[in-house]
Amino acid sequence: MSPHRAIVVVFAAHGAVAGSLSTRIPWIQEHLQLSPGTLGLALLCPAIGAFVGMPMAGRLAYRFGNRAATRALLALWCASLTLPALSPSPVWLFGAYLLFGAAAGMCDVAMNAYAVLLERRLGRSIMSGLHGMWAVGSLAGGGIGALAAHAGIDARLHLAAMSLALLVLGGAAGRGLLPDSGLAARLADAPAPRRFALPTRAILAIGLVGFCATFVEGASSNWTAVYLISVTDADPGPAATGYTVFMLCMAGARLLGDHVIRLLGPVAAVRTGGAVAAVGGALVVVARTPALGIAGFALIGLGVAVIMPLVIAAAGNAGKNPSEGVAGVATITYLSGLVAPAVTGWVAGGLSYPAAFAMITGVVVLLALLAPVLRPSPASHPEGTVRVDA
């Protein structure tokens, strides 16, 4: 397996873990007799675990190498898939979800840092396609989980089987990853990252772009169905279709996004994507029919799709330690993912749903204006690679 194909499988496996568990949340709620409030607290724990764990991932990657860290943390992430379903009580569930989130976040940092190094070595953009494959893996894991739930299979059996299968798949992919010495000679001269790496000034501007992109993604994915029902009088079926269209457009655009980035360069790609997403946001605001609303959400998904992969690549290239830059920007974007759904709900409740998505459209315009911070620096393109600029 080539190094590029290996990291593709790693991203897909990571997504499959997330998709697998998401479909069995109703089983966990019923099994433990959880109230909606208790379940909501439990579902907050993965984000907290990731938020705490991600800043430590850079140190692990430096100590053991990006290849070894990616392999070990992917195995930990796959193994943790069974923990929530095995929890005997809500307290144990909170702990399981904290560990699950920490493993997810640290693996996320390690595999993205490895991808930054491989992208440098190849001299071309691959990050968008990798994030597209994460979405494909998530959809596949979710689809299998939906079939298992429909068949009435115990979630403990289903998730254990998926955990084992993904461990085998991830292990096979891990053997195809290149060691750090084959990725970038510059790492040998890089200083050790801090033990708990918070975002530095060098990547705060990059992180702001990521904050805006994640805010738009999180708000749209969480509120699409509710918006279509409340504003356009859509039935539950078309409303659910709107969410599916949004996610499919985002996944498809990411799979094709590397070609766009190579053609336009990162700055122009973000500006173009921002313009498309802004048009989509405007359509959502004025939509009073389900079809127009779904079209607007589709454009939002298409427009913001390549921005986060570009943010991760820019953060990884902001210093000599890709894992530290990725960890810093990931900390910012996870915070955005936590607040986006809540802020959108507050604005919708205080004003209206169209007002909330007018705000989101404004966030899209802001990230387009901030696009120049993603312009690659000469230092991030060592001799032998191709610099693609806007």
Image (spheres, grey):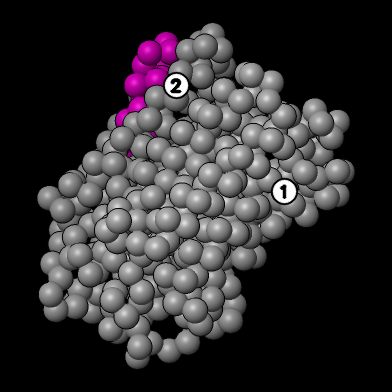
Q: Position of residue 386 (x, y in %)?
A: 13, 67
Q: Position of residue 99 (x, y in %)?
A: 69, 57
Residue 297 in magenta stretch: yes
Q: Is residue 211 left or right of residue 45?
A: left
Please rate how many residues cluster around mark 2, counting C-alpha atoms within 10 Å: few if below 14, some from 14 to 19, many from 20: many
Q: Secondary structure at mark 2?
A: helix
Q: Is residue 73 left or right of residue 296?
A: right
Q: Is residue 259 above or below residue 228?
A: below
Q: Which tag is nearer the camera, tag 1 or tag 2?
A: 1
Q: Within the image, what quadrant is residue 150 found in? A: top right
At label 1, the amino acid type is Leu
Q: Is residue 40 visible?
A: no
Q: Secondary structure at mark 1?
A: helix
Please rate how many residues cluster around mark 1, counting C-alpha atoms within 10 Å: few if below 14, some from 14 to 19, many from 20: some
Residue 301 in magenta stretch: yes
Which residue is drawn at the image coordinates 40% and 20% (left, top)? 294
Which residue is drawn at the image coordinates 78% and 54% (left, top)? 95
From the viewer's side, name the closer residue of 319 and 342: 319
Which residue is drawn at the image coordinates 43% and 89% (left, top)? 191
Q: Position of residue 14 (x, y in %)?
A: 49, 49
Q: Is residue 245 visible?
A: yes
- Dot 1 corresponds to which residue? 83
**Dot label at residue 262:** none
Q: Looking at the rendering, in which quadrant would you find the C terminus? A: bottom left
- Dot 2 corresponds to which residue? 242
Which residue is drawn at the image coordinates 24% and 41% (left, top)? 256
From the viewer's side, name the closer residue of 59 and 235: 59
The boundaries of the magenta stretch are 286-303
Q: Is residue 271 above or below residue 378?
A: above
At label 2, the amino acid type is Gly
Q: Position of residue 232 (x, y in %)?
A: 49, 13
